[in-house]
Image (spheres, grey):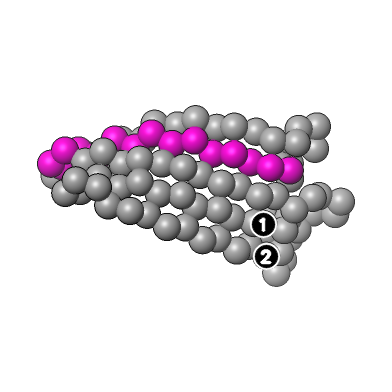
């Protein structure tokens, strides 16, 4: 509630499968209903694969955003990313 809330509601779910000893492949999806007047519901799906080598993890992923709520001129947007995590 309140003027700062970006979404009136959101539902997310995902699943992952472990490979080798510590690698992980996964998929997640999310639906969100934005709080702004006249904005359309947004769907997001992400596919990723986390490569784990000791204390280093590299995760390439791709996201598909359908009906981007804050970009009404686009029906879908693809976002490619590469994340890295280093643990001591």
Looking at the image, which residue is at 21% across and 41% down? 52
Within 10 Å of disc 2 (Cα), the crowding (few <14, some 14-19, many 20+) is few
Looking at the image, which residue is at 86% across and 51% down? 38
> Height in image: 2 above or below 59?
below
Write down the quadrant of residue 2 in the picture.
bottom right
Q: Are marks 1 and 2 in contact (CB under 8 Å)?
A: yes
- Per the rendering, the mark at residue 32 is 1
* Relative horizontal placement of residue 78, taking residue 24 as reference (left or right): right
Between 62 and 82, the one nearer to me in the picture: 62
Q: Secondary structure at mark 1?
A: strand
**Residue 60 drawn in magenta:** yes
Within 10 Å of disc 1 (Cα), the crowding (few <14, some 14-19, many 20+) is some
* Relative horizontal placement of residue 87, taking residue 8 as reference (left or right): left
- Per the rendering, the mark at residue 9 is 2
* Relative horizontal placement of residue 44, taking residue 55 as reference (left or right): right
Of marks 1 and 2, which one's residue comes earlier in the chain?
2
Magenta stretch: give its range: 53-67
The x, y position of residue 7, in whole percent, is 68, 59
The x, y position of residue 71, in whole percent, is 75, 36
> Height in image: 44 above or below 86?
below
Looking at the image, which residue is at 29% across and 35% down? 58
Q: Residue furthest right?
A: 38
- Quadrant in which the N terminus is drawn: bottom right
Write down the quadrant of residue 4 in the picture.
bottom right
| Magenta residues, dominant SS class | strand
The x, y position of residue 12, in whole percent, is 55, 60
Between 39 and 45, the one nearer to me in the picture: 45
Tell me if I can see residue 5 in this picture.
no
* Relative horizontal placement of residue 76, taking residue 37 as reference (left or right): left
């Amino acid at each position: 509630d309140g003027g700062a809330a970006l979404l009136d509601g959101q539902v997310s779910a995902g699943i992952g499968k472990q490979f080798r000893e510590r690698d992980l492949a996964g998929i997640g999806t999310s639906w969100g209903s934005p709080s702004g007047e006249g904005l359309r519901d947004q769907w997001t799906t992400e596919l990723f694969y986390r490569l784990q080598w000791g204390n280093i993890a590299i995760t390439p992923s791709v996201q598909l955003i359908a009906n981007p709520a804050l970009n009404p001129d686009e029906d879908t947007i693809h976002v490619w990313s590469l994340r890295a995590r280093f643990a001591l």
